[in-house]
Amino acid sequence: MQWTDTEYKLQVRERLGVISQRIRQAQEKTGRAKEPVRLIAVTKYVDVQRVLALQSEGLKDFGENRWQSASSKVEAFSGGTWHFIGPLQRNKVLAVARHFAWIHSVDRPQLADEIGRAANQLGKTVSVLLQVNISGEQQKSGIAPAQALDLLLHCRALSGVNVRGLMAIGRQVDDPEDARQDFAALRMLRDRLQTASGVSLPELSMGMSNDFDVAVEEGATMVRVGRLLVASGTS
Ligand SMILES: *Cc1c(COP(=O)(O)O)cnc(C)c1O
């Protein structure tokens, strides 16, 4: 059953309250209560009407992982900040760079080059995160940790590209505690890269519906929450 707009907004308000409180608790547990954590609503499951409802409930950051399903939403929408979080093909880069302020999924130098070219053409700067395959699972996208420094140095030299940090997807496990090692490893990699390059990398994009509490405890500054926050209707 699909909810009406009013029912949907009430649901979102309630879920937002719960999620915000869980983020606060995770921050307090680790003494990071004053550091902001940005909640990105991953809207790939819903249409533009629902995105507008999410915005009216106070959400400001929205994430999409495929241009095909994002285009109708980002084009119909104003205000708010869009984050591209999925695999990105070079022929979609110009469209994505036009509408998205952030790209979380930079995992190879050619893609960074293309983003730089698009940004220059559009007269803007795109904030990017380097996606790292921190768990080393074969099927996962992301650059290997050992190659991350080279990619970072490559990106730093590009105009139109502003590298702000790292992104990873924790391993899919029943108990989110088992993903903690991935989040901790991403944070430690970030610390090493900062030291080695002198580039400041304040952002860590990690944590989704099933593991965002643990990710925040391990230093996430951005969590990407879909199902738990935006899903529409009873299932
Ligand atoms: C879909 C998606 C999310 C959100 O996942 P949920 O489990 O629905 O919270 C986060 N990050 C990426 C890269 C995604 O593709």
Image (spheres, rainbow, N blue to C red):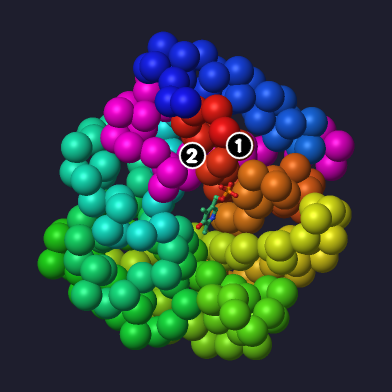
Q: Are marks 1 and 2 in contact (CB under 8 Å)?
A: no
- The amino acid marked with disc number 2 is Ala
Q: 85 left or right of 95?
A: right
- The amino acid marked with disc number 1 is Leu
Quadrant of the frame with the C terminus: top right
Residue that numbered label 2 is attached to = 41
Q: Secondary structure at mark 1?
A: helix
Label 2 C-beta lies within 8 Å of the nearest ligand 1 atom: no
Q: Secondary structure at mark 2?
A: strand
Q: 20 left or right of 80?
A: right
Give the percent coordinates (x, y) of residue 108.
44, 82
Residue 208, labelled with which disc?
none
Q: Nearer the viewer, residue 211 or 8?
A: 8
Give the percent coordinates (x, y) of residue 80.
34, 35
* Residue found 26% across the figure and 42% down from its top: 73
Q: Nearer the viewer, residue 166 or 171?
A: 171
Q: Quadrant of residue 170?
A: bottom right
* Residue found 31% across the figure and 75% down from its top: 89
Closer to the eye: label 1 or 2: 1
The residue segment tinted magenta is 28-57
Q: Quadrant of residue 33?
A: top right
Label 1 C-beta lies within 8 Å of the nearest ligand 1 atom: yes
Q: CA distance from mark 1 to mark 2?
A: 10 Å
Q: 64 left or right of 97?
A: right
Above or below: residue 16 compared with residue 190: above
Q: 232 left or right of 95?
A: right
Residue that numbered label 1 is attached to = 228
Q: Which is nearer the N-term, disc 1 or disc 2?
A: 2
Q: Residues within 10 Å of mark 2 (few under 14, many from 20)?
A: many
